[in-house]
Image (cartoon, helix red, strand yellow):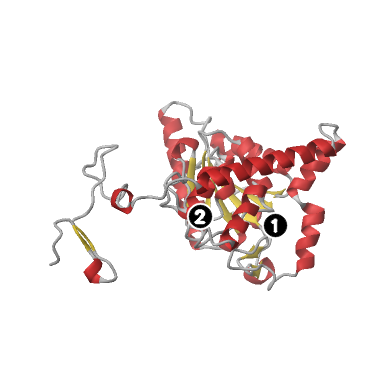
Amino acid sequence: MRRMEITCDNEYKARNIRGFCHLYDGQEAVATGIQYAFDYEDKWITSYRCHCVALARGSSVSSIVGELFGVKEGHTQAKGGSMHMYSKERGFYGGQGIVGAQVPVGAGLAFAQKYKAESEGRPNQMNVAIACYGDGAANQGQIWESANMASLWKLPMIFCIENNQYGMGTSIDRHSSIYEYYKMGNHIPGIHVDGMNVLAVKEAMRFAKEYVGSGNGPMYVEAKTYRYHGHSMSDPGTTYRNRDEISHMRSTKDPLGFVKELLVACDFANEAEIKEKEKEIRKQVQSEVLKAKESARPVPADDLMSHVYATSLEPGAPSEYPPHIRMPNYEKSYFADGKMD
């Protein structure tokens, strides 16, 4: 995850990636911990900071980076970009480009999980749904409404606040009157976990999954974490915090550093073996990025309107072009019959 996100940073600066790009480095323990507590029957939806969640759910580096490059073999065939990756077969319902909008959808996924479990006669053995969102979205009305419905209907829903301590460029003490986000559900139980410790996240999510999946209703989980990059690639991340703060977090709380120290302390690996593994990962990511760069670009005539207009309502129905596509320059508009009205 870390190497992929650093590579995305470099490729963005080289102008091989354009548009919005929100990196996840520093927060990797959250996605990794959730993945090891869940299975693919559990449904997961998150924010636009979604590259590493897609990777955790089993997608390849080449498909993720390829999506950022805009190639046809990208994660969503170059139609989603950085913020809209999706894999239904892996239980990943994507990144959401609108702040907080993934949470009501997550509640809908939880409703579907309960409906399915009850129809199969296992109301207390439900698969769950999780919606991850940041501290900057935590006070939105749509989240409160989703929590209310989830509580009323006892949905197997986990509201996961990835508190990276800054809502875009605003610190939590300036944008929220409450800092203990796990308590925001009022009567809905909540737990706080160190989001820089992958083992703590895994155990917290295992507990949350068991609780909500047993018919007890939803739960809030706050994972306190930290992002090393700015909010997006357009944000240097140093105007509202200083470099010393970032360096301190890297040196004392880094989630990768924690795992490395633990491996050495428990005699699972030595420093030489860890360095060799890091070199192997670096080469693997480089190879995957090269594969993405060599992939074909979409062909507008074939791919522009696929998955937009269907010929029928039957599953798997082929796509078709609409009779007319209005362009900003009307003279360049598309007409199926080749004529301009």
Q: Residue 303 appears at what percent x and percent y?
A: 33, 49
Q: Can residue 190 be seen in this view?
A: no
Q: Quadrant of residue 213?
A: top right
- Residue that sits furthest to the bottom in the current view: 239
Q: Residue 277 appears at what percent x and percent y?
A: 74, 38
Question: Which residue is painted at 55% across and 51% down in the image?
Answer: 50
Q: Which mark is residue 301?
A: none
Compute the Cα span from label 2 to label 1. Answer: 20 Å
The amino acid beneath tag 2 is Ser
Along the line of sight, the residue nearer the viewer: 333 or 117: 333
In contact (CB < 8 Å): disc 2 and disc 1: no
The residue carrying pointer 1 sits among few (fewer than 14), some (14 to 19) or many (20 or more) residues within 10 Å by Cα, namely many
Circle 1: element type: loop
Question: Which residue is painted at 80% across and 35% down in the image?
Answer: 273
Q: Can residue 16 be seen in this view?
A: yes
Circle 2: element type: helix
Q: Residue 268 appears at what percent x and percent y?
A: 81, 31
Question: Which residue is painted at 64% across and 70% down in the image?
Answer: 170
Say which residue label 1 marks: 226
Question: Which residue is painted at 73% across and 42% down in the image?
Answer: 278
Q: Residue 20 appears at what percent x and percent y?
A: 51, 62
The amino acid beneath tag 1 is Tyr
Report the quarter where the C terminus lies.
bottom left
Q: In this view, does 171 lie to the left or right of 50?
A: right
Q: Which circle's residue, 2 or 1, is located before the other in the chain?
A: 2
Up the image or down, 200 lies above or below 186; here it is: above
Along the line of sight, the residue nearer the viewer: 217 or 321: 321
Q: Quadrant of residue 173?
A: bottom right
Say which residue label 2 marks: 82
